[in-house]
Image (cartoon, rainbow, N blue to C red):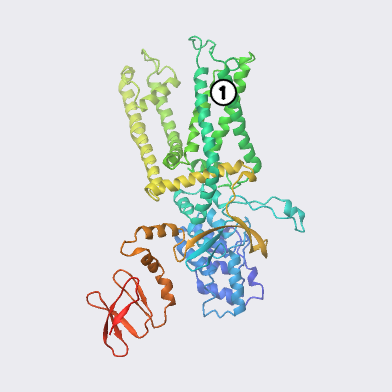
Amino acid sequence: MLPEGYEKKICAKGPVFQDTVMMAGTPLGVAALKFNKNIFNIVLRVFATDLDVMNSNRDNIIHSLIKYAHIQPEKLNKVVEMISYVIDCKFVNDSTCGYEDKRRRKLREKSRKLLMMTNKDEMNPLQLAGKRQQFQIFDLIMQNEVYRSTESGDGFFNEESYDITEIETLKLKREEINSKNLEDDIRPEHHESILEYLVHQETKTAFLFVDCLPIKEVIREKWKFYRWVFLSWFVFHLVFMVVLSVAAVYRSKVKAPVSRNTKIEFTYVVTHDTFVSVVSVVGLVFGLLYLMMEISRVLISRFLYRPSSNLLKRVLRNISSPYSNQIFRIYFTLFSLLLILDCVIAATEASGSFSGYENYCLIFVVIIGWYLTLFFLQTFKAFSIFSVLIQRAIVDMLKFALVMTFLLVAFSVAMYMIMQGVETDEDDFDFFSTTLFKMLTIMLGIGELGVLFQARQPYLAIFVFVLFVLLTTILLLNALIAIMSNSCTDLMSNYGGEVAAKLHCRLQKLSAILFLEGCFPNFLCKEVGVEKRKHRYHNNEWEKNVLRRIWMRTSVHKHNRAKDTEKATHILNNTSPNEGVVSMIMQNLNPYLESLKLPDSKVTPVNTTTHFINEPEVNTVEGENSDTVAICRTCKREIEVTSSLFTPMSTRH
């Protein structure tokens, strides 16, 4: 037997225990990760171990189970069962444990405390489940009484309230300074929203999260607020790009044809022509505004979540994620810098202090500016899938381009060596750069092949060419098509058809919301829900007036959550004319009335409508022709039963 208090200090530390059941660090945690409920009860009861025991990382048993599910995804169902066993206090109801009433109350309180505790990374189990992409665990915790409560006022309608403090992107307003330590009140508090994690998740997992009722409603209410701001921005950007494109066409016109080495003179010059000058100044203003948005994002630093601590992995993950707005932030920054440079350089050249600028920045400004329209179109359901596919295709193209570059350089060098010393009318193979471009055109099927027969070794040139076509045009290009097709299938087959498009659009709206809130001050941002004070475990102690953000809704009693409105509509739409609304209501109240009937009362089924009899002296059975027959308990004789929809049931004896 261990000394009193010693068993609470047992912790398994060190890297050797990572990714194993010993990662829990405590005997109670190891028993939970082994899914052994008997050992769990023995450790909890015999060794008097606290239910809220933590390891060296301040992880309680719920934290450890979530991490274990992330490492061992094939054991997810067992992990969910074990978490339900712990947070629902099923071990307390076990008759073999023999807990006293005081101990039972204490354990129930600590089971609620488990869901409010934060670990070393300042994350509670709900946040950790969202970060580790464990939707089943997230949904289980979200439906617990800690985060969800239901109150029924009339037995038919429920008032459901959800604690969305960890879902909301904005942290709660700072309370009055009443702490003994002034520094703790002034120090900014870090707040990671679960919505931040969704844009970095895999498509299948992200679909599950955004279809969850609290998350879906938070996104919907936020988008309702930001929609007009976003659409107005889209209109301004679209009008600006149309005007800028017209100005770019005018600025590219020259006074007379010139050769390659001759200085070019443009007809419409900035500061000399009113139209192009005004457009250039407006472009400067747009560039400064976009640049200020990015600077304010850095200064506000509202969203600090990083998918990886490694910079290269973080960049690759942001680029590969079809819902991350990181790539659009890069485009907007380039767009703004190029607009500013174009205006400054064009004005400087017009003054005579600089020459030789041929609108290089403006060329890329037009390309990037029109591409940025995808950023706005992604929030429309009809275009959201195209934005996702393009971003996914860019990732596939980067992988393809790397392999293609190696082969293109290799065969270009080989073809350049073969074609040396050949006198032809064309100079395609006189320089390595032209040879490289020629091989690229051949790969795309737009180059001429007759020059190959003029080589010193024509058969060798043809052999190299055929091998090049087989490896690039036939093999690699078709592999690229297959990869893109697989990406499209993967994006559309998770939920299929219109539902997948709807969920893609919802995730794209979330991406736009995070983009806007990242650079907006608090007074311009939308807060969902109302602030209420609740009894919570906070700052390592129980507090009665902890500020939390609550979202409430009204639902129909006994209906499945997240589908109450749809089911009610379905029932009303599918009510037959013969039944009527009253019959429909009686059928939905069937479970409620059945629970209230007398002990000896029987429910008599009828062909179309269920009626309830409170007649203790009669037993009912089914007849041969679907007629209802009652048996009198006194004389044991059969009685014919007739019924009507709105009149009480009668019998003839």
Q: Is residue 306 above or below residue 531?
A: above
Residue at 53% x, 39% y is 230
Q: Is residue 510 above or below residue 108?
A: above
The answer to whether 356 appears left or right of 374 in the picture is: right
Describe the element under mark 1 as helix, strand or loop: helix
Residue at 55% x, 40% y is 229
Give percent across and percent down for residue 552.
55, 58
Q: Hey, which residue is sitting farthest front in the picture? A: 647
Give percent across and percent down for residue 97.
54, 79
Q: Is residue 175 above or below residue 267?
A: below
Question: 458 or 331, which lies in front?
Answer: 331
Q: Hey, which residue is sitting farthest left in the picture? A: 625
Q: Please tell me in which quadrant of the rendered image residue 292 appears.
A: top right
Question: 390 or 608, which lies in front?
Answer: 608
Type of the residue with mark 1: Val
Give percent across and percent down for residue 7.
63, 72
Q: Quadrant of the N terminus?
A: bottom right
Give percent across and percent down for residue 455.
34, 18
Residue at 49% x, 19% y is 249
Q: Please tell me in which quadrant of the rendered image residue 649 appears.
A: bottom left
Q: Is residue 315 above or below residue 68?
A: above
Question: 579 or 9, which lies in front?
Answer: 579
Count of marks, rendered view? 1
| Residue 460 shows up from this direction | yes
Residue where numbered disc 1 is placed:
279
Q: Please tell me in which quadrant of the rendered image residue 15 appears.
A: bottom right
| Residue 20 shows up from this direction | no
- Assess disc 1: are there few (<14), some (14-19) or many (≥20) residues with their C-alpha within 10 Å of its C-alpha: many
Question: 300 or 458, which lies in front?
Answer: 300
The answer to whether 202 appears left or right of 425 in the picture is: right
Q: Quadrant of the C terminus?
A: bottom left
